[in-house]
Image: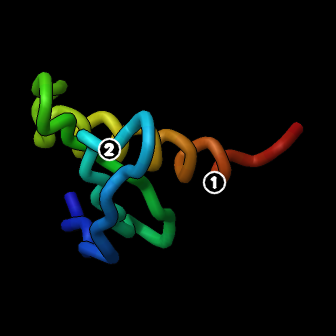
Amino acid sequence: MKKAKFVRKYYGRGYDRDFVYLVYEYRGYKYVVEENTAKGSEPLSWQHRNEQAQIDRLIEEQSQPAF
């Protein structure tokens, strides 16, 4: 499994001011994981795993021949 490359970090404003958003690039696709600093959220490792698995499925589907 390839590693994701960190792209940037930004903070929410207004209603989502307690969120920190981390943008990563994996196999040519960008995805975002989020941390809710007020309440806690799904662990970042779970979010990474889910997002990367979704990208892997997408790439696999695109590589399948169309009938």
Q: Residue furthest front?
A: 14
The residue under the point 17% across, 25% down is 42
Where's the N terminus, which quadrant?
Answer: bottom left
On the rendered structure, is 24 left or right of 66? left
Q: Give the residue type that dot 2 points to.
A: Arg
| Disc 1 residue type (three-letter) | Ser
Instruction: Place residue 24 in its image quadrant.
Output: bottom left
**Residue bearing mark 2:** 17
Front position in the image: 28 or 7: 7
Select label 1 or label 2 by which is in front: 2
Q: Residue at x 13, y 30 (%)?
A: 38
Of residues 9 and 6, the one nearer the viewer is 9
Q: In the image as oriented, which residue stretches furthest toward the right?
A: 67
**Measured from the top left, where is residue 25 in percent x and y?**
38, 69
Residue at (63, 54) in percent of width and height: 63
Q: Earlier in the sequence, mark 1 or mark 2?
A: 2
* Residue annotated with mark 1: 63
Residue 40 percent across, percent down from the top left: 11, 26
